[in-house]
Image: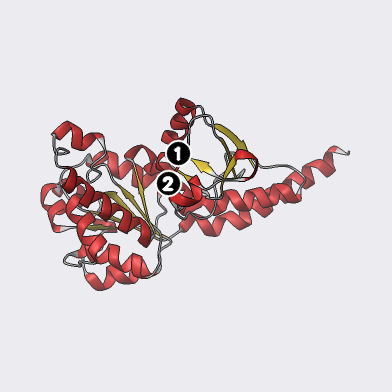
Amino acid sequence: MDENILERIKGDLLEQIISCITPLLNRQAAVIFTGGKADAAGLLKVIDGLLATKAKIVLSEGFASVMPEFKAACQDRLLADYASMQKHIAGSSLVAVPILTRNTLAKAATGVQDNLATCGIAGALMRAIPVIAVKDSCDPDGSHFRELGIDKNPAYCEMLRDHERKLASFGVKLVDSGEFSVALEAGLYGDIYSVAATAFATAGTAPAPSAAPAARRDIPSEAISAPQPASIIRLTDSFITCEDLMSIRPGTNVEIGRNAVLTPLAKEYIERRGIILTFA
């Protein structure tokens, strides 16, 4: 084929992809901080690296009091009153909670709205806006609890697990800190990969298996463990975490969509358990 024709095809393809992607790069989002101390510089780096310029930040009074330097650093992106926060969240594509404390976990799971943070989370859930929350500080099965020695009461731990299950049923995606960046990318910019995949398919070129999807929804545990034809478990989810795989036995054949995103912890779990992964 003539090189000039090839260049025109590549140019047209690139233009098509860019025209579809550009509107997605300025997605509106909200980031809600609640609880105790955290690495302010690290948190700002994650937010600045993954969220669009329209992202705004909500601070609970507790977080603002112990992290004044963080509040000062993000002053121009702060939502400090209820009305402006709810207006912003209503137009957001995603709400992120980088530190989900036990206190906020319990309040969100039971519908309590007593500060900006809990009101913001409730506002997102009632509007069915995707919420991604890091559970390290509230998960009774996590290393944080073991290190502090606060995992000794089975009944109390089960109460926290009930709260986690309740939030998950509301549509909250609970992830480990190591999965947070991937979850944000998939939640905010997954459409970009889908658009690119469509454009490449139009040009007769297959997209990479690791491309990210447009959306994420929880997989019921019964769906994972249900018998599948030919001893293959098919996960139709577009964003798969380590937690989603824990009901799957070692050596099981698991089929996922070619555009599905696997978090780093999920990949480690697959290798460690000897799960055989194929792409549909």
Give me the disc on residue 263: 1
Residue 76 falls in image quadrant: bottom left
- Relative to 255, does residue 59 appear above or below in the rendering? below
Instruction: Find numbered disc 2 in the image and state the secondary structure of the residue it sits on.
Output: helix
Looking at numbered disc 1 in the image, what kind of residue is underneath it?
Thr
Image quadrant holding the C terminus, namely: top right
Name the residue at 17% across, 31% down: 147
Residue 218: percent from the left, percent from the top?
44, 54
Name the residue at 20% across, 47% down: 70
Residue 117: percent from the left, percent from the top?
22, 60
Residue 77: percent from the left, percent from the top?
29, 58
- Relative to 122, does residue 220 appear above or below in the rendering? above
Is 144 positioned to the left or the right of 273 in the image?
Answer: left
Colour scheme of the picture: secondary structure
Q: Are marks 1 and 2 in contact (CB under 8 Å)?
A: yes
Q: Is residue 117 visible?
A: no
Give me the disc on residue 183: 2
